[in-house]
Image (cartoon, rainbow, N blue to C red):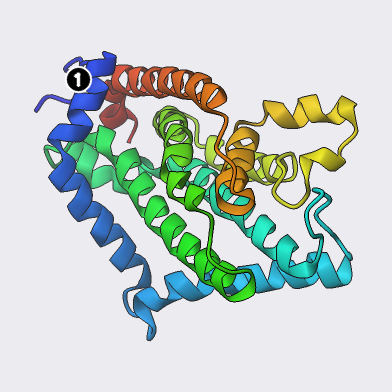
């Protein structure tokens, strides 16, 4: 396959390529997950203990050291803070992991660019698949904590995949864009970590948006993770239905971002081999 041949860029082509290569995506996602823990004594078990350890650490720091409480009108004890905090961590981890990895996705897979006939556009999808796996492992930790500390979760928890889907779609678009940009501008990889760290504190991960002054709420709501974090807490913690209208609008915006990111990736990929 000539790498300089123009690639299809339509929204339908974006969906079609993911579906056509679904078997490859699944196989490489499994390899990605297993490979991350290959050689370690505990293997995949680390994917369970890592989020559990982070939950305990963050809970200790924010409730015991900083004496934080979740001012939501609900019970504001340490147990509630841990459960609400962890939902924000689960959602934001998907965003941070993919954005931080995106600029090096192509650079670290030069062999796929130069030597092998390979659909480069699926690399961000594979990275997303691995992060979704870890998301649901973390969600399992959350469910066990909720069962042990509170009781049976609300039935609305079953809506969590629907809440997270538009978030995943939008992140894919950003990942396609950054994966391409990282080939031509290596400094991008140095800045994404700073940006995701800043956005983490500008999202209601560690605090309730209701505790913010009105003048700051508008800034926090601009963060693409804010709305999804709040909706995830609605369905998982508070037992409320999500804002369906808001999710619909968010999905449209995310689909547009995904297509623009895919369009940019396909238009610029012909230059990857020359640069690398």
Q: Is residue 217 left or right of residue 259?
A: right
19 to 54, vertically: above or below: above
- Can you say whether 204 is above or below 215 in the image? below
SS at badge 1: loop
Q: Residue 6: x, y in percent? A: 20, 14
- For residue 191, say whether it is visible: no
The quarter of the picture where residue 234 lies is top right
Q: Quadrant of residue 252?
A: top left
Q: Residue furthest left?
A: 1
- Residue at 70% in and 72% down: 57
- State the image coordinates of residue 188 (x, y, percent, origin top left): 55, 35
Q: Residue at point 23% right, 17% down?
A: 12
Is residue 176 something one can see in this rendering?
yes
Residue at screen point 77% across, 73% down: 60
Q: Residue 5 vs residue 98: left or right?
A: left
> Residue 106 falls in which quadrant of the image?
top left
Q: Classify residue 201 as left or right of residue 114.
A: right
User: Could you say which is closer to the camera, residue 53 or residue 182?
Assistant: 53
- Give the x, y percent position of residue 228: 57, 37
Please name the residue that numbered disc 1 is placed on. 4
Q: Give above or below for 271 relative to 166.
A: above
Q: Nearer the viewer, residue 127 or 232?
A: 232
Q: Which residue occupies the extreme bottom position in the image?
A: 41
Instruction: Identify the image quadrant of the C terminus.
Output: top left
């Amino acid at each position: 396959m000539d790498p300089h041949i123009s690639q299809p860029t339509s929204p339908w082509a974006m969906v079609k390529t993911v579906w056509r290569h679904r078997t490859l995506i699944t196989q490489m996602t499994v390899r990605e997950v297993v490979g991350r823990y290959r050689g370690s004594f505990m293997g995949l078990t680390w994917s369970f203990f890592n989020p559990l350890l982070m939950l305990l650490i963050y809970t200790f720091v924010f409730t015991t050291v900083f004496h934080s409480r979740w001012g939501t009108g609900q019970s504001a004890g340490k147990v509630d803070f841990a459960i609400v905090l962890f939902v924000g961590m689960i959602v934001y981890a998907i965003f941070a992991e993919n954005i931080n990895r995106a600029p090096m996705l192509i650079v670290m897979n030069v062999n796929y660019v130069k030597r092998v006939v390979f659909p480069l556009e699926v690399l961000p999808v594979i990275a997303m698949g691995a992060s979704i796996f870890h998301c649901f492992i973390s969600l399992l930790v959350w469910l066990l904590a909720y069962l042990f500390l509170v009781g049976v979760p609300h039935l609305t928890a079953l809506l969590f995949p629907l809440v997270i889907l538009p978030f995943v779609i939008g992140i894919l678009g950003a990942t396609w864009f950054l994966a391409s940009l990282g080939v031509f501008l290596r400094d991008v990889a140095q800045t994404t970590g700073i940006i995701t760290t800043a956005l983490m504190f500008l999202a209601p991960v560690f605090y309730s948006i209701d505790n913010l002054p009105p003048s700051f709420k508008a800034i926090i709501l601009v963060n693409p993770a804010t709305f999804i974090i709040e909706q995830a807490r609605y369905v998982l913690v508070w037992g409320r239905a999500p804002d369906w209208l808001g999710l619909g609008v968010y999905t449209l915006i995310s689909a547009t971002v995904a297509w623009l990111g895919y369009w940019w990736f396909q238009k610029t990929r012909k230059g990857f081999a020359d640069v690398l």
